[in-house]
Image: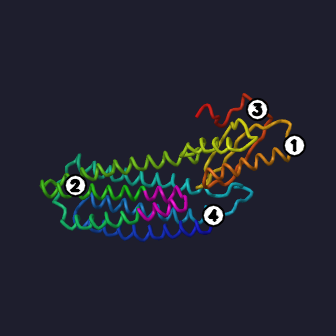
Amino acid sequence: MKNREKILIRASWISIIGNAALSISKIFVGIIAGSIAVLGDGIDSATDVVISLVTLFTARIVTRPPNNNYAYGYEKADTIAAKVLSFVIFFAGMQMLISSGKNILFAVPRDLPSIIAIYVTLFSMIGKLGLAYYQFRQGKLAGSPMLIANAKNMRNDVIISAGVLVGLFFTFYLDMPILDSITGLLISLYIIRSAINIFMESNVALMDGVKDTSIYNKIFEAVEKVPGACNPHRVRSRQIGNMYMIVLDIETDGELTLNEAHEIADNVEVSIKQNIENVYDIVVHIEPIGKHHSEEKFGLNRDIL
C-alpha cells in the first residue's frame, strides 16, 4: 500500500510540474502570437494541472485503512477521482468549443498568428508524449484507473497539439486566419469526446462491474481444477481500486464433514488466486449437490457466458 501511495504521489507531482510549465508557455505564446488554437491547447494543459492536483489529493486517501464507515477501505476514491476528471476535461472542451464557435460565426477580422506558435506547439508535443508515457507506466504499475485516465488525457493532448500544428501550417500556407479557429473547434470536440469516454469507463467500477469480463471464465476454470468442487454458480466479481472481490457458490457432496467441505473451499480460493492476479478476497458459499436455489437473482453461471 505504501509503495502504491508513493507511486501515485510521485507521478502526480511530475504531472503538476510538467503540465504547469507547458501550460504557462502555451498560454503566453498563444496570447502573444495571436493563436486561438495554441491558447486553447494551453488552457487544456491548465486543466491537466487541476487533474494532477486531484490525483495528488486522492493518492492520500486511497491508502487509508478501513474503518466503521468504510469497511472496504477507500480504494474507490481512485475511480471517483477519474469521474471528477471527466467533468473537468468536459468543461474545458466546452469552453474551447464556445470560444472557437464565436470566432467562426461572427468572423472577427484577425491577423495571422506568429510563427513562434509552431515552435511552442512542437515543444509541447514532445513534453506531453513523455508525460503521457510516464503516467501510463506508473498507472499500470500501481493499478490506478485515475493515473491511466490521466495518461489517456495527456495522449489526447499530443493529438490535440498535432492538430494545432497542422492547423497552423495551413493557416500560414493558405493565409486564412479563420483556419486557426476551425482547428480550435475540432480540438474542442475531441476533448469533449475524450471526457465522455472517461466518464463511461469509470461507471463500470462504480456500479460494481469489471472491465475485463474474461475473469469469469478464469474463475470457472479454476474451480473445475479442484477435486470435489462442482457446479460453480452465482459468480460475482467487482473491483475495488486495482483489486478484485470475488463471491461464488459451489456444490459438494452433502455427506462431507464440515472440515472436508471447508478444505475444498480453501482449495477453490487457492486455485482462483493462481489463475487471477490482484485478488483481494474470495467468499465461497458451499451447497450440497442439487440443492442450489433456482430463484437466485445475482451472479453468473457457466451456461450464460
Q: Residue at x 22, y 55 (%)?
A: 167
Q: Which residues are magenta?
A: 133-151
Q: Quadrant of the N terminus?
A: bottom right
Which-is-in-front pick, marks 1 and 3?
Answer: 1
- Pointer 1 residue: 257
Residue 137 falls within the magenta-colored stretch: yes
**Which of pointers 1 and 3 lies earlier in the amino acid sequence?**
1
In the image, residue 227 sits, relative to residue 42, either above or below, namely above
Which-is-in-front pick, marks 4 and 3?
Answer: 3
> What element does badge 3 sit on?
loop
- Pointer 4 residue: 63
User: How dense is the environment of label 2, judged by Cα within 10 Å: few (below 14), some, or many (20 and up)?
Assistant: many
Q: Residue at x 58, y 47 (%)?
A: 206
Amino acid type, label 3: His
Amino acid type, label 1: Thr
Amino acid type, label 4: Thr
Cα distance, mark 1 to mark 2? 74 Å
- Pointer 2 residue: 167
- Pointer 3 residue: 292
Which-is-in-front pick, marks 4 and 2?
Answer: 4
**Which of pointers 1 and 4 lies earlier in the amino acid sequence?**
4
